[in-house]
Image: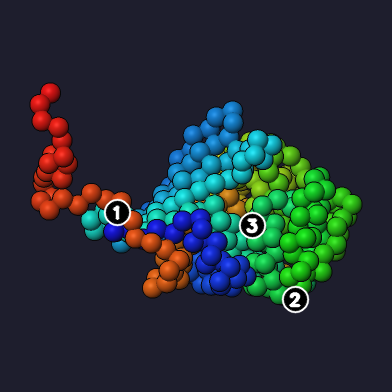
Amino acid sequence: MTRFVDVANMVRWTASVGPERIIAGMIPYLEADFRRWEYFDKSSRVASHTPFGVIELMPTSDSETYGFKYVNGHPSNPQRGFQTVTAFGMLADVSNGYPTFLTEMTVLTAFRTAATSAMVGKKLARVGSSRMAMIGAGSQAEFQALAFRSALGIERLTVWDTDAAAMEKLVRNLGPLGFDITVATSAADAVRGADVVTTCTADKANATILTAEMVEPGMHINAIGGDCPGKTELDPAILERSAVFVEFPEQTRIEGEIQQMPADFPVTEFWQVLDGTAPGRASEEQVTVFDSVGFAIEDFSAMRFVRDAVEGTNFGEDIDLVASPDDPKDLFGLVGAFAPVGP
């Protein structure tokens, strides 16, 4: 049997535990897997691009467990009554290939993206950071705010989005949770004086929502919106003056902010910061950029966390996903008794 966490159970579990505690609990799983980064199979996501959006598979394995996520990205979906991003994922036992865990990942991906940002922010943001600017108030925004409060204690937010309704939604959702929120009049207004700047817009276009003139010494830029070929959010001049950290360079050079830069543009893989083989922030004045596009190992970590967290609870169910005939060589025997006789 395969353990399955559907949307209803994911929502019930979240309501029971609390989103901020889930993010906090996921971070150690991410850190543990990043520290053993070299032991994973790694490849760029397998993407099918269409005029409507992209559908992707994100696989990885640590030689004991295999995992993958199915995810889409369709920017025009909200105008048609659909979400921009949906996903599901699976873990399997490498020794026999059987799937052991299946879960929705539309909600879970929001948790893992935020938890990854916070994990990196703990290492790269200035000590004592107290204010985050958010450019983009879409589906990921609240999760990012909770993650940075959980990991860095940041409660002061300044938000800017071209969609006034999105900003109202963010204030409505986060205000009751104790955040001090300022609605800005522009992106430049939002980032002025911020310690951390999170950029996360949905439009699949090469845009410049953050210019070099807006960036102040010592900022940490959590650039999570550039996540496919042809989509960027940062002025290339920002990258030229910053220390840039990535997940998997081969994928980020195709999909991230650094797709704008030469192929030999220097970056640091974040796992090296965690294991001490590369430096993180070098000074209080240095500008750091996390050019995040999302990587399969993060999904692997998130699924491991949920699998372990719901074990022994009623937040999942066992489903009969794999046919199991009494004789492993007689699959037909499983159905043959019910087959009509004759042509």
> Is label 2 in contact with label 3 (beta carbons under 8 Å)?
no
> Is label 2 in contact with label 1 (beta carbons under 8 Å)?
no
How much space separates mark 2 and mark 1, taking CA atoms? 50 Å
Residue drawn at 78 percent across, 66 percent down: 175
Q: Residues within 10 Å of mark 2 (few under 14, many from 20)?
A: few
Residue 50 in view of the camera:
yes
Q: Pinpoint residue 232: horizontal percent, then vertical percent.
A: 68, 42
Q: Which residue does the numbered mark 3 point to in the structure image?
A: 290
Q: Is residue 22 above or below residue 75?
A: below
Q: Pinpoint residue 15: horizontal percent, then vertical percent.
A: 58, 68
Q: Which mark sits nearer the N-terminus, 3 or 1?
A: 3
Mark 3 residue type: Phe
- Label 3: element kind: strand
How much space separates mark 2 and mark 3, taking CA atoms? 18 Å
Q: Which mark sits nearer the N-terminus, 2 or 3?
A: 2
Residue drawn at 80 percent across, 49 percent down: 165
Q: Which residue does the numbered mark 2 point to in the structure image?
A: 128
Mark 1 residue type: Asp
Q: Which mark sits nearer the N-terminus, 2 or 1?
A: 2
How much space separates mark 3 and mark 1, taking CA atoms? 41 Å
Identify the image quadrant of the N terminus.
bottom left
Q: Which numbered circle lies on residue 320?
A: 1
Tell me how many marks there are.
3
